[in-house]
Amino acid sequence: MKIYLAGPEVFLPDALSIGQQKRDICTRHGLTGLYPLDTAVDLSAPDASLQIFKALEEMMDAADAVIANLTPFRGPGADPGTVYELGYMAGSRKRCFGYCNDPAPYAERVSRHTTVTKADDNRLIDRDGLTVEDFGLPDNLMMIHALELHGAPLVMPRARSADIWHDLASFEACVRLAAGKLD
Amino acid sequence: MKIYLAGPEVFLPDALSIGQQKRDICTRHGLTGLYPLDTAVDLSAPDASLQIFKALEEMMDAADAVIANLTPFRGPGADPGTVYELGYMAGSRKRCFGYCNDPAPYAERVSRHTTVTKADDNRLIDRDGLTVEDFGLPDNLMMIHALELHGAPLVMPRARSADIWHDLASFEACVRLAAGKLD
């Protein structure tokens, strides 16, 4: 069974080593991990980004499931590139798993980046007056419930990981879930 | 033809009025707009967020295409909830259209929120050492090329809209594109 390994760790300096660790964990559980950096794209080509997209779409189409790393990236929510891939796999009717190394509710995460207050109509709002989702979920409800209904509920540590980009315990829990459900 | 109208404007205080305007524009072009707030969910129910998810997934499954508002939301990139929906529609093999009222390249957007520098290996990086995508695209390549290959290239104004949440010119351009392609 092939698992597409979506996540913003591809943007880390040691992205290749993390990919190797993730693939090794998959192998130990009898699964094959497909990592986005496993594509052979010439990054100096003028259409490099389009080539990457095509290679990743092909990789997703070849996979039976996705494990998405939804750890907050450059703001209160998950990395949009990763979220696109999670949505694509859900739309493709593949199994969806995900984890997040920061269990804080979304409203708390937003308050780390901007002032959150209560509007006259009782909505929680940010500095721009935009509603802050306040269902007690860690991120936008679309991702959280997609996992719940199309694979397994989001896996999170009890407290924020000391090293949110390198702690793979919740990832491994997802691999275990995937191995069980895809049998 | 039914178009799912994805976007973070559902978080604005005048979300209902924007939805009405979007639906009216669709109607003028012979299309039916499906707006996320058109669902009848009791927001005080304990499982309100799950009910919303189910209603929106049903709405997307009933639609022939999506028009996603990818204007930056609470950070340099698009709203993850909207991006999930774009991915879901692409995975469902529906036509994908999108617009963004801020045409700035992604690296420039990131520099509004954090310090962007060049690493020793020439990668553009943010304060945390994470690579900043630098293909000259306005957002993560997954969304940009998904639109290009599964519908039409991202529609953007030449300069940032004065009112990024209420300017519907690029939205209307998407509706025109959708009406042409779905005929």
Image (spheres, coloured by chain):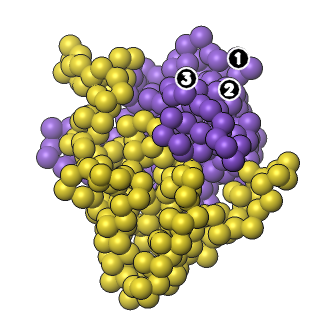
Chain colours: A purple, B yellow
Amino acid on which the number 1 mark rests in the picture: Ala
Q: Position of residue A48 (x, y in %)?
A: 22, 45
- Counting residues from the start of the chain, the first of labels 1 and 2 encountered is 2
Amino acid on which the number 3 mark rests in the picture: Arg
**Residues at circles 3 and 2 in contact by the CB criterion of under 8 Å:** no
Q: Is residue A170 left or right of residue B124?
A: right
Nearest to viewer (mark 3 / mark 2): 3
* Distance (Cα) linking label 3 and label 1: 16 Å
The residue tagged 3 is: A112
Query: Which of the chains bears the disc numbered 3?
Result: A
Q: Is residue A153 left or right of residue B66?
A: right
**Residues at circles 3 and 1 in contact by the CB criterion of under 8 Å:** no
Both on one chain, marks 3 and 1?
yes
Instruction: Tell me the crowding category of disc 3: few under 14, some 14 to 19, or many 20 or more residues within 10 angstroms, Cα based.
Output: few
SS at circle 2: loop
Amino acid on which the number 2 mark rests in the picture: Pro
Query: Which of the chains bears the disc numbered 1?
Result: A
Q: Position of residue B82 (x, y in %)?
A: 51, 53
The residue tagged 1 is: A159
Q: Quadrant of the C terminus of chain B?
A: bottom left
Res. A103 mark: 2
A156 to B138, vertically: above or below = above
Q: Nearer the viewer, residue A73 or A155?
A: A73
